[in-house]
Image (spheres, helix red, strand yellow):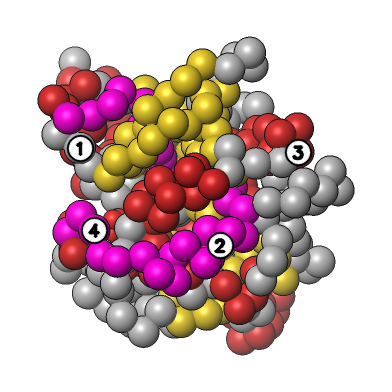
Amino acid sequence: MTKNPQQRIRMAVFPVAGMGTRFLPATKANPKEMLPVVDKPLIQYAAEEAVAAGIETLVFVTGRNKRSIPDHFDKAYELEAELAERGKTDMLELVRNIVPPEVTCVYVRQADALGLGHAVGCARPIVQNEPFAVILADDLIVSHEGGALAQMVEQFERTQCSVLGVEEVPGDETGKYGVIDPVATDTPGLWDVRGIVEKPRPEDAPSNVAVVGRYILTPRIFGLLAEQTPGAGGEIQLTDAIDRLLQEERVTGYEFKGERFDCGSKQGYLKATVEFALRHPELKDDFEAYLRSRFG
Ligand code: UTP
């Protein structure tokens, strides 16, 4: 890639076209990304993280049953009028400006759920030739350091190369993730990625440093995705295209500071719900008292 020190990350791609089979029947008519954690859908937490990282355009790659996502980010005239009429100004604030007015939402369609790599490739006509972020909303990340994506954008601005959000996972869980072959750099938390494998068995995994749902990628990935053949699970895997990208360009992995909840699984989703309830200003005292009475 020709290095241009001025390059900024202006767009974030949200692939929301998966089948969400682990949450059926809840995801039969509703996307997984609209599942709420306490009172906010997963996709809104993800959009807020992107906005906090300075993203100006949110690109949603939608599939079947995804109408509720555009509806969530659109103006809701009737609801707003109703709340205004009833004088419910607090609630009006909550539904207005789900994202700031200067942020643009764009929707593209993935007609068939052919895999995450294919979904990201669907954003090419919008993103075109600039580096961009990818956020998987089912990985919910809480960070008190400006957000996981903001930390990764900072690394990109310094290095001008692709950055994968990574985390050390228990050795027996590598089969759930893309796992990198990491090489230490001079920057704490930053690895050079020498290789990446999708869902390796623990005995085949190059490490226990796993990629979680945050990426900053150079546009070269689009050309690689366009010719990517199906990999693990018969799907077009983003991991496979990244493995080819790192043979052409520097790719790094960054251990962001934050706490991640895997809301794509029921267990992770329930943990997130409990943790967010225990931190919610209106709920925390009563909810904690309930848990204490429940468990003694
Ligand atoms: P997952 O691997 O979690 O798959 O996708 P899934 O279909 O959403 O859920 P399960 O495994 O059946 O329960 C990771 C991310 O990639 C998106 C999903 O929406 C999710 O954000 N994705 C996956 C797509 O947008 N398109 C695809 O074809 C596959």
Front position among marks 2 and 3: 3
Mark 2, secondary structure of its residue: strand
Tell me which residue sits at (49%, 43%) in the image: 246
Mark 1 or mark 2, which has the lower sequence index?
A: 2
Label 3 environment density (alpha carbons within 10 Å; few <14, some 14–19, many ≥20): some
Side (left or right) of 266 relative to 4: left
Disc number at residue 231? 4
Task: Say which of 159 and 149 sits in front.
Answer: 159
On screen, residue 159 versus residue 237, left or right, reads right
Q: Earlier in the sequence, mark 4 or mark 2?
A: 2
Q: Are marks 1 and 3 in contact (CB under 8 Å)?
A: no
Report ligand 1 position as a quadrant: bottom left
For the record, the magenta segment spans 204-233
Identify the image quadrant of the C terminus: top left
Q: Among all residues in the image, which is located at the extreme front? A: 248
Foreground tag (4 vs 2)? 4
Query: Which residue is pictured at 54% across the width and 72% down the height?
Result: 123
Name the side, left or right, on which 38 lies relative to 115: right
Among the two numbered marks 2 and 3 on one chain, the one whose residue lies closer to the N terminus: 2
What residue is pinned by disc 2?
A: 13
The answer to whether residue 44 is seen in the rendering is no
Kindly indicate whether the residue at mark 1 contacts the one at mark 4 (C-beta within 8 angstroms): no
Give residue 114's quadrant in the image: bottom left
Rendered view: 224 above or below 291 = below
